[in-house]
Amino acid sequence: MGLFRKNKPQAEYPFADAPDTAVFTCTHVLSGTEPIRYVTHDEDDGAWQFVCGGEHEEADARIVSLHSIWKLDPSVGKLAGMSLGSYAWRTEAAASWNIRRTQSD
């Protein structure tokens, strides 16, 4: 028997965007006081937002890497294929994601 135990394999990073892609989030998500409940993948610039879905002030905004959001909440990996111009929501951390396409004018 070897000296080292085999670690449980980690899930592969699921996003097509690079792990160091900058994404928007809020202090509530980063502090762990609220789960990610609302995600957008903007059509105009491809930006991602992962927020709690509550009310925010500008001071609540943070920019982090996509990889760090995925590590914080691996369930967002289910949204990796979400097309530009779409948004997703759920009522709580254990709930399933609902995905919709943004209505264009």
Image (cartoon, rainbow, N blue to C red):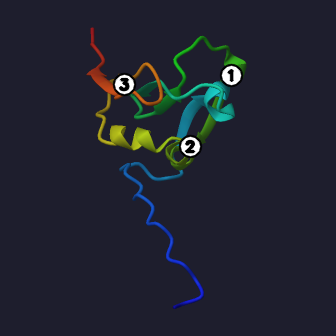
CA distance for labels 3 and 1? 20 Å
Residue under label 3:
88
Q: Is residue 10 above or below residue 27?
A: below
Inspect the image, locate mark 3, and give the three-letter code of the amino acid beneath it.
Answer: Ala
Element at badge 1? helix
Q: Is residue 91 above or below residue 74?
A: above
Inspect the image, locate mark 2, and give the three-letter code of the amino acid beneath it.
Answer: Leu
Q: Could you tell which of marks 1 and 2 lies nearer the N-terminus?
A: 1
Inspect the image, locate mark 1, and give the three-letter code of the amino acid beneath it.
Answer: Asp
Q: Quadrant of the C terminus?
A: top left
Residue under label 2:
72
Taking the spot 46% from the left edge, 33% from the top edge, the residue there is: 48
Which quadrant of the view contains residue 27? top right
Q: Could you tell which of marks 3 and 1 lies nearer the N-terminus?
A: 1
Left or right of 21, for residue 11: left
Residue placed furthest toward the right: 59
Left or right of 88, for residue 92: right
Q: Is residue 23 above or below residue 15?
A: above
Confirm or deny contact between disc 1 and disc 2 (CB under 8 A): no
Left or right of 69, for residue 31: right
Which mark is in front, 1 or 2? 2
CA distance for labels 1 and 2? 18 Å
